[in-house]
Image (tube, rainbow, N blue to C red):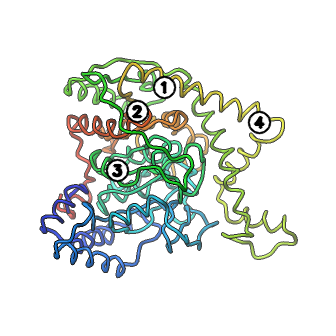
Amino acid sequence: MPATARQLAESLAARELTSMDALQRSFDAIDAHEGDIGAFLSTTDRDLLRSQAEGIDQARARGDTLPRFAGVPIAVKDNIAVQGERLTCGSRMLEHYRSPFDATVVGRLKDHQLLLLGKTNMDEFGFGSSTENSAFHRTANPWNKNFVPGGTSGGSAAAVAAGYCPWTLGSDTGGSVRQPASFCGIAGLRPTYGRVSRYGLVAYCSSMDTVGPLANDCSDLLELLKIIQGVDPFDATSSFRSPSAPGASPTRLGVLEELFAPPCTPDVVHGREVIEKAASACGWRLSSFKLDYASEALAAYYIIASVEAASNLARYDGVRYGYRAAEGSSWHDLVTRSRSEAFGDEAQRRILLGTFAASAGYTDKYYETACRARRLIHNAYMRLLDTCDVLVAPISPSPAWRLGEKASDPMEMYLSDVLSVSVPLAGLPAVAIPSHLSAEGLPIGVQLIGKPHSDESLLELAALISKHVGFQNVPRHHAASNGL
């Protein structure tokens, strides 16, 4: 099957392939590899999908005007609402919950007649960096099933890397699109905050949550962004500005030099050399910069995110919807038992941390101080972006680690986010692109960071530099079976 959504759409339009054929190839890939990978939490009824594909094929045969990507398969992360389908967020709390409505992004996918294969696995409510915190099963990296795919959108990244579909939707709060994209050797975009509606995205940290696309290349990211972006009356934080004017010629690339330093492993540091070489081949002008307040980003992020998570998860009380304990001697006892039984360890840890940081006597010391640091980080980025068109930085200090390696050490897991969290604090767009393989043969990516609402131009620049990098993002185990 064609590796990109654009190639698949061209084959469908030329009648070289039918939507039914494309759908069956997705089913074949899932049947062949899902037992080892575990990318999905639930899948759409296959007869329903076949009926949809058949209808698209018939309309195309009649010569009807169809959306460009009609009949192209896609999957979405299981914290994005799909009407009538399970919406678990990887948690026992919502194990049996089915959404009564579509998220805005899902409605736009349906308007373009994409075929929704199912809902992908994730760390519970977005709490984690490896997709090992799901209450149902963990997901493996398609490049090596003994390693994590990253998180929290690990299921979405693995579905693309495994060849199930050419693109997926995930969500990025502190790095949850960019880091799994890097670990799985694909591309992933965190859009400018507000550019994509959050209506129907289950809230974790409302001031930083974004829906973002994952795909095999940046041009597919751009096409999917065009489908899902735009102002939404159901999301007061949604916004859209026309693409920014082209920057100076040649393009100015700023390297965040101190971020390519320990704790980054030598494998990760090599990404700087790869990108600088590719940028030079593009004729770009390179400069090195220091990001002020970068060392404060991780603490600021985890305080703000935990405070907002504690507030957002307060609605899951065992009374209105979601998991409810079998019995309780009082309302307070029922709520306590329901939350204790349904929330996993990491969810409980963040609820406790956020409640403490926002409690009387500690709000100014922790939460308000973190918010001030957030503003300083935003201003530091904007100063750098006044002098260059795009910044480059690593995404994670290391390549993917082995399943179980960090699962019992929350601090080690948090530290893996140290390079990804400053971007959401600043509300900026950033795209992850694969750069090279580690010594163990695992993908490593870098992130390109742009000005607010420069998403389109950022993706165009990322596509250009990716061509010069020349990374082959096809895991060895499924290349032959997919005909790639």
Q: Mark 3 points at which residue?
A: 226
Disc on the earlier residue, 3 or 4: 3
- The mark nearer the N terminus, 4 or 1, is 4
Cα separation between marks 4 and 1: 26 Å
Measure the C-alpha gap from mark 1 to mark 2. 9 Å
**What crowding class fits label 4: few (fewer than 14 Cα within 10 Å), some (14-19), or many (20 or more)?**
some
Residue 298 vs residue 230, the one in the foreground:
230
Which disc is residue 449 wearing? 2
Q: Residue at x 33, y 65 (%)?
A: 114
Q: Dot 1, crowdedness within 10 Å: few (<14), some or many (≥20)? A: many
Question: x%, y% of residue 435?
Answer: 30, 37
Marks 2/4: CA–CA distance: 31 Å
Which amino acid type is shown beneath numbered disc 1?
Tyr
> Whole-Å distance between the Cαs marked 3 and 4?
40 Å
> Residue 363, labelled with which disc?
4
On screen, residue 265 above or below 72: above
Q: Could you tell me the amino acid type at mark 4?
A: Thr
